[in-house]
Every structure is written in C-alpha cells, then in structure tokens.
C-alpha cells in the first residue's frame, strides 16, 4: 500500500494504491489553493475508504514538480512528516511524467505535458508513445511557432495540462490537440510502485521539490 500525494497545481489530489492499482482516491481542484486545509482531510478519507490505517502503508509518494512553489511545499512537507513519523521510505514522482500518462498514444504520436508558469511561460517536456522523454524538462517562453519545428515531425501532438491552451494559441497546427487537465494522484500510482519495487527512495532529510526556477513572489507595494 502506497499513499500518493499530488499538490503541484491547484488540484489537491490523494490516492492509495495497492501494487500500483488505485483502491481509493480523493481530489479537489479550485482556483484558489486549498491544499493546507484539504490535504490531511483527504488523507484520512482515502485511508477510511481503503479500510486501512497509517500503519498499513509501506511508502509515501509525492509529486516532486515542477509546479506551484506553494503547492509543492505543502505536499512535500506533508509527505516528509508522515515518513518521519511512520519510519517509511519517501518516493518522488515527476509531475510532468505522471501528467503525460493521462494521454494514450499510438506510434508516431507525442504528448507534451505543460504547466502554466505565468505570462507566456510554461514548464514542459515531451514523451513518445513508448513513454520515453524526448525533450528535456524546461521553463519555456512561448512565442509564435517556437515549437513548430519539432511538433511538425509527428502525426499527432497532444498538449496537455494547465499551459496547454496557452501554447495552442501560438501553435495552432492541424496535428495538435489540447487536453485541459491537471496532474492527479491516480496516475502517480504505477510510477510510485515501480520505484518502490526498485527501492528508488529519496533522502527524507534532504529532499526538496523540483522547482525548475526560483520562486517569484508578488512585488512589494509602494509606500504611499
């Protein structure tokens, strides 16, 4: 049994999976982040639905980013706290990889998971139909046709995530489809189980989220 926590975006999502198969699941996506209020409530609810207790868990998995600075901090802090308290291993799952699994591909197709990073920037990468990463994860500033050179090489390209529509507006090629969705703890389950079997664990004391770029808070207000 593995507890999966996804808080990299506005979607607060939690699942419990047994050997990679989801047995209980709870999530809520709101415009304003409610992770601090909802996360531990959701954890209790999925435990109850799965009819298990914290002592039945064998690992805690958390979405490691990139994504929202605040969302990632909340999720990772909760996961690390549980690992310390329960003496369990910590597993990290790449957010864009789990997001890409919401799209089923055929040969010659590619999925480009994208998360909104403010203004005309997105966090993005790309995977082929075999799940191989074919572009490095990056913070990409979108400009007219800035992705067209390589997207034109595929029969079908899926832009998926909170930054997908923004990207499509400057790359409206006929072979591109948009899936406006968010990362979920459902898709984390198989990835976290693979890491559990291979004992690919994080150091609980030193693990930090993958922010990809420095935190940019609101500008201070000028004094009157």
Image (spheres, rainbow, N blue to C red):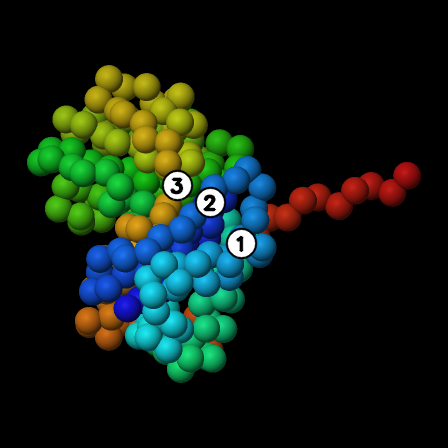
Q: Residue furthest right?
A: 224
Kindly state the secondary structure of the residue where label 1 is placed: helix
Q: Quadrant of the N terminus?
A: bottom left
Q: Nearer the viewer, mark 3 or mark 1?
A: 1
Compared to residue 75, the image places residue 204 above or below, namely below
In the image: residue 140, left or right of residue 190: right
Q: What numbered label is drawn on residue 182?
A: 3
Q: Which residue is mark 2?
A: 28
Nearer to us in this view, 23 or 117: 23
Q: Answer yes or no: is residue 94 visible.
A: no
Q: Which residue is mark 1?
A: 38
Dot 3 crowding, Cα within 10 Å, few <14, some 14–19, many 20+: many
Q: Nearer the viewer, mark 3 or mark 2?
A: 2
Q: Whole-percent x and y of residue 186? A: 31, 51
Q: Residue furthest bottom?
A: 87
Tell me the CA gap for discs 3 and 1.
17 Å
Dot 1 crowding, Cα within 10 Å, few <14, some 14–19, many 20+: some
């Amino acid at each position: 049994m593995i507890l999966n926590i996804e808080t990299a975006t506005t979607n607060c999502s939690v699942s419990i999976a047994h050997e990679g198969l989801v047995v209980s699941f709870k999530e809520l996506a709101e415009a304003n982040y409610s992770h601090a209020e909802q996360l531990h409530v959701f954890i209790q609810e999925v435990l109850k639905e799965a009819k298990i207790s914290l002592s039945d868990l064998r690992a805690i998995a958390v979405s490691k980013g990139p994504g929202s600075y605040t969302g990632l901090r909340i999720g990772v802090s909760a996961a690390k706290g549980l690992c310390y308290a329960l003496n369990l291993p910590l597993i990290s799952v790449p957010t864009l990889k789990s997001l890409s699994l919401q799209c089923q591909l055929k040969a010659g197709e590619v999925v480009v998971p994208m998360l909104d990073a403010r203004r005309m920037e997105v966090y993005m990468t790309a995977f082929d139909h075999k799940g191989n990463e074919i572009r490095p994860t990056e913070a990409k500033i979108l400009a007219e046709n800035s992705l067209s050179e390589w997207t034109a090489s595929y029969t079908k390209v899926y832009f998926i995530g909170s930054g997908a529509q923004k990207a499509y507006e400057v790359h409206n090629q006929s072979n591109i489809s948009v899936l406006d969705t968010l990362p979920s703890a459902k898709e984390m389950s198989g990835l976290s189980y693979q890491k559990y079997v291979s004992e690919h664990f994080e150091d609980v004391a030193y693990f930090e989220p993958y922010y990809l770029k420095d935190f940019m808070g609101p500008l201070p207000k000028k004094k009157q």
